[in-house]
Amino acid sequence: MKIPKKVLNAHSWLEAQTYANGESVSLLMDDYAKYYHEAMNTKSPTPTDYDHVDLILKGAEGYGLKFEVERSAHQYLATDPTLTLVEAYTYGYNDWVK
């Protein structure tokens, strides 16, 4: 009688592996995959975006409202991470400079 060999798929193999601290390799791989997916699907600001933000802040500084515009922009980014950097600073500028 032949004894069938146990065939492991990659996920089963990863679950069986652990790091020295006892943490499962598969959990770390899942975390990495999630981070990688988010990093690849988010658009990083370009140098042109930073130049645009700089111009927005210089305009706000002319009214003495640079800090307020920055604070508003950061609040917009915190509440809606889908906004681009330029959109958030534009909204912040429009909140304070009328």
Image (cartoon, rainbow, N blue to C red):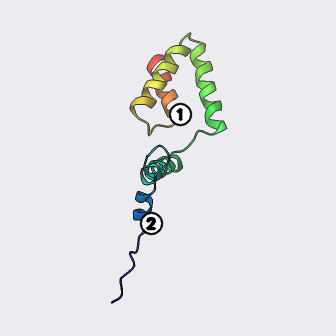
**Residue beneath the point at 63% across and 25% down:** 55
Where is 10 relative to 89, above or below? below
Location of mark 1 (residue): 85
Looking at the image, which is closer to me, 12 or 22?
22
Is any part of residue 94 visible from this angle? Answer: no
User: Residue flagged by tag 1: what amino acid is it?
Assistant: Leu
**Residue beneath the point at 39% across and 64% down:** 12
Res. 43 image quadrant: top right
Q: Which of marks 2 and 1 is nearer the N terminus?
A: 2
The answer to whether the residues at label 2 and label 1 have Cβ atoms under 8 Å apart is no
Residue 72 position in % (x across, y down)? 46, 21
Residue 35 position in % (x across, y down)? 48, 46
Location of mark 2 (residue): 10
**In this figure, what is the number of numbered marks?**
2
Is any part of residue 75 visible from this angle? Answer: yes
**Residue beneath the point at 45% across and 31% down:** 77
Residue 1 position in % (x across, y down)? 33, 90
